[in-house]
Image: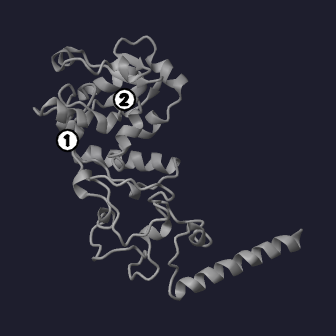
Amino acid sequence: MKKAIALIALLTVLTAKEAVAECKGVGYKGKSKEFCIKCHTKGCPIVHPTGCKVIETECIRVPYNFPLDNGKLTCTTCHDMTSKNKDFLRSSKPLKRRFDFCFQCHNENCYKKFNPHETIASRLPWSEKKKACIYCHGVGARLEAYKACVGCHTKTPHVGAPEHLFAKREEVEKLTKGKAQIIDIKSIKDLKPKLSEKVLKERKPKIVLVNGKIECITCHNPHPQIAIAAPKEDKTWLKVEKEDLDYKLKELREDLNRFELNTHGVKLMSYQLKGGELCKVCHSINSLK
């Protein structure tokens, strides 16, 4: 058994060495991804999927010198072993910005980011505002609150975020059961998103749970026209926030250096922060001491 394992290991090493030798020579010019994954099996994040059929549109057009495998993306579509780029990326010009490589196939105008919060609170026509709705909710307005937020807000954690988002349903129910300011939604329809802005403004603020769980939209309201602004934090509170977050991230085995603290204050809140009003919706005053 041990001899068989040793033989398999030896054959794997020899195959990999042959592949490396070929790469160090002229470089692999074929289209099969099987050659690449002989060596690149681990530690290689797949930024772009392979095996996808390319359908050209006004936003996507693959240059003639980016080879496809029967019309599908493969490793050598993007990578050229003879390229002087450190990642062997294909390019006819120097890659100075992070997305310069991507915009060789993708039309940059199709991928310009905008702030959906500002768009839905603007005076733009409904045809433009609708784009902001789709940006967060997706086509058909799926209820994926957390995923919708972290698509953009990836580096701004804050005090309370870890223990609230990971709180168990039964713990949340103990704190929130029977409280009038709290609603538990099962689908996007429960929020009645098609109500007029005038009706929305007349609504009393609510704390929203999603299927019994705390989500970003529990404490934050992404719609500026009906959200409550919070003041900028002072230096003393920022120090406390950093220490608190650092401790919690260590408990979660995460590194604070991966994140950037938000020091500009929180603009979009579901409830008033002053006097701890937001916290007191769920927590009693005694529990907050």
> Which residue of the protein is positioned furthest toward the bottom in this rendering?
25
Residue 97 disc label: none
Q: 275 or 90: nearer the eye?
A: 90
- Quadrant where the N terminus lies? bottom right
282 vs 115, nearest the viewer:
115
Q: Identify the residue under disc 2.
A: 140
Q: Is residue 87 above or below residue 105?
A: below
Q: In the shown orientation, is residue 162 left or right of residue 123?
A: right
In x, y percent, where is residue 148? 36, 38
The reply to whether residue 283 is in sight is: no
- Specify whether residue 102 is in view: yes
For mark 2, give the secondary structure.
Answer: loop
- How far apart are the two marked residues, 2 and 1, measured between alpha carbons? 36 Å
Q: How many numbered marks does the figure carry?
A: 2
Q: In the image, is residue 155 above or below residue 170?
A: below
Indicate the amino acid at tag 2: Gly
Q: Quadrant of residue 268?
A: top left
Q: Position of residue 89 (x, y in %)?
A: 40, 73
**Circle 1 sits on which residue?**
232
Q: Specify whether 233 is left or right of 255.
A: left
- Residue lying at the far left of the rendered structure: 123
Q: Quadrant of residue 209?
A: top left
